[in-house]
Structure formats: structure tokens, C-alpha cells
Image (spheres, helix red, strand yellow):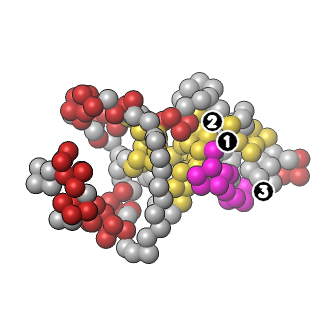
Amino acid sequence: RRVLFGGGWVCVGRGADVVAPRSRRAVPLDGAAVLLVRGDDGVLRGFHNTCRHRAHELLPCGATATGRFIACPYHNWTFDLDGSLHKVPAEHRDGLGAGDFGLVPVAVAEWQGFVFVNADGSAPPVSTYFAGLDERLAPYGIDRLVVAAEHVYELEANWKLAVENYHECYHCPSIHPQLCRVSPPDS
């Protein structure tokens, strides 16, 4: 997973999940979580979903929140929406500088209505990574898609098995005949 996904952009959701200023959503990413935050300035930012004080989870994965600050539920350290440390309780202030212990950023980009995260920050810009796709996808208006339903599947299997099954279509004529009418398995 580190080799295949670590150096690239991974889709973690839709921009509509965090469209309003001051909105937040924790999303899973390779066994950890990223906190997506829409600032008052409209910019979408991503941070590792852990407090810098005792590494407590800031928001449960899948949960959403809104507000002017990001507060750690463990010791109530408070962060601004840009990830900088805003305030700590009096008993934790000794030796802290104004710029110390802000949230650790994660590279985030919005493209065609989707939110992508690059865990190690080494991926090329989204415009380079998806070069040529904007024109090919334009007729489909995928930037205007909305989520109609969600399904979560817990598989007790190696993730590669599920991906391989998704990519082969030998089973499509018998299991997905409606799909085959729209997208033939041999296309």
C-alpha cells in the first residue's frame, strides 16, 4: 500500500462533504485518518487526525463537525482552522512557543468535485497527475455528481482480492446484466 498509494493522490471523498466554511470531516487513509478542514477563507486543508500533545484522535473517522476551532477532546488543546495551535490549558503552557505544536499537514487537492490526499506529499500537482483527463471527462459533468447512497463492506480478505475482482468482468454478464447493457464487458 505504501508503494502503490503513498506517493500518489488517493480519493477520500467529495468536496461537498466539507463545502461550508468551518466544516470538518475525518476520513480514513491507509490505516490512519486525515482531518479535512474548510477554513473561513474557503481553502480545504488536510491534517493528520491526531493532536500534537498526546496523539489523541481529533475527530472519529467518518464523523463531521463544524466550528471556529478544532479542539482535542482529550486535554482540550485548541487549533485554528489553518492547523496552528491556538490555545492550551494553563497547566500545559510551560515552554510552548507561539508557533509550536500545530497540526501536521497532509497534501490535499480538489479535482472534479473529488477530494484527493497525498500522504507523503511527494505526488506531482493534481493538474500534472490527472493531465488530459479534464477534457475527456468534461462531457460527463462529474464535478456536479452528488452522493445518493453509501455502502460499507468489511471484507476479511487481502485488499488486492477485492480490487482484482472489481477489475475483471468475467462475472458481469451473469451478475450485472444491466451494467453490461450500458458498458459491455469487452469494451
Q: How far apart are marks 3 and 1 (CA)?
A: 16 Å
Question: Most extreme residue toward the right, as rendered?
Answer: 90
Q: What residue type is labelled 1?
A: Ala
The magenta stretch is: 53-65
Check contact, mark 1 vs mark 2: CB within 8 A.
yes
Q: Residue at x 46, y 42 (%)?
A: 148
Residue labelled with disc 3: 74
Residue 20 seen from this side: yes
**Image quadrant assignment for residue 141:** top left
Along the line of sight, the residue nearer the viewer: 113 or 29: 113
Position of the N terminus, as image quadrant, is bottom left
Q: How far apart are marks 3 and 2 (CA)?
A: 20 Å
- Magenta stretch: residue 54 in it? yes
Of the image marks 3 and 1, the number of the one nearer the N terminus: 1
Q: Residue at x 55, y 31 (%)?
A: 19
Q: Which amino acid does label 2 sit on?
A: Ser
Residue 134 seen from this side: no
Image spot of residue 99 (x, y percent): 69, 40
- What secondary structure is found at the residue carrying circle 3? loop
Check contact, mark 3 vs mark 1: CB within 8 A.
no
Of the image marks 1 and 2, the number of the one nearer the N terminus: 2
Along the line of sight, the residue nearer the viewer: 40 or 14: 14
- What secondary structure is found at the residue carrying circle 1? strand
Residue labelled with disc 2: 23
Identify the disc placed on residue 65.
1
